[in-house]
C-alpha cells in the first residue's frame, strides 16, 4: 500500500496528498502539513485549491462598508 503525505505546493499554495516517494524525489517543491492525507478507505484526499477570491471580496467590502446603491429611487 502506498504511503501518502498531505503537503502544500510551494508554488501554488494548493494542498494535496502525494505518495511519499514523490515527496522524497522533489521535497523542495512541497511543505508537509499536519493533516491526514487519506480517507477512512485509504484513498488520497482531494486537492484543496488555494483561492484568493474570498480575501479580495472581504477587503473590498470592508473598504466600501458593504454594497452601495448606485442610482436614486424614483418617487
Image (cartoon, rainbow, N blue to C red):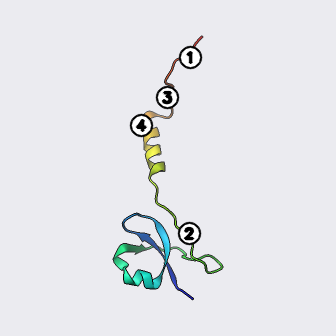
**Mark 4, mark 2: which one is toward the viewer?**
2
Does residue 18 sit above or below 65 in this rendering?
Answer: below
Per the rendering, the mark at residue 46 is 2
Cα gap from disc 4 to disc 1, whole angstroms: 24 Å
Neighbourhood count class around disc 2 (C-alpha, 10 Å): few under 14, some 14–19, many 20 upward: few
Per the rendering, the mark at residue 73 is 1
Q: Which residue is mark 3?
A: 68
Element marked by disc 3: loop
Name the side, left or right, on which 44 lies relative to 54: right
Q: Earlier in the sequence, mark 4 or mark 3?
A: 4
Residue 10 is situated, as x and y percent measured from the top left of the image, at 37, 68
Q: Earlier in the sequence, mark 2 or mark 3?
A: 2
Q: Earlier in the sequence, mark 3 or mark 1?
A: 3
Cα gap from disc 3 to disc 1, whole angstroms: 13 Å
Residue located 43% across and 69% down the image: 8
Does residue 35 sit above or below 70 in this rendering?
Answer: below
Q: In this view of the protein, which residue sits in the foreground, 49 or 59? A: 49
Asked if the residue under mark 2 is in contact with the one under mark 4, i.e. CB atoms within 8 Å, the reply is no
Residue located 50% across and 35% down the image: 66
Q: In this view of the protein, which residue sits in the foreground, 53 or 61? A: 53
**Mark 4, mark 1: which one is toward the viewer?**
1
Cα gap from disc 4 to disc 3, whole angstroms: 11 Å
Neighbourhood count class around disc 1 (C-alpha, 10 Å): few under 14, some 14–19, many 20 upward: few
Q: Earlier in the sequence, mark 4 or mark 1?
A: 4
Residue 14 is situated, as x and y percent measured from the top left of the image, at 45, 65
Element marked by disc 2: loop
Q: Which residue is mark 4?
A: 63
Of all residues shown, which one is farthest toward the left? 28
Amino acid at each position: 500500500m502506498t504511503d501518502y503525505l498531505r503537503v502544500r505546493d510551494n508554488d501554488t499554495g494548493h494542498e494535496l496528498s502525494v505518495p511519499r516517494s514523490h515527496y522524497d524525489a522533489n521535497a523542495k517543491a512541497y511543505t508537509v502539513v499536519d493533516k491526514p492525507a487519506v480517507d477512512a478507505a485509504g484513498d488520497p484526499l482531494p486537492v484543496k485549491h488555494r483561492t484568493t477570491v474570498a480575501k479580495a471580496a472581504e477587503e473590498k467590502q470592508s473598504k466600501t462598508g458593504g454594497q452601495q446603491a448606485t442610482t436614486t429611487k424614483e418617487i
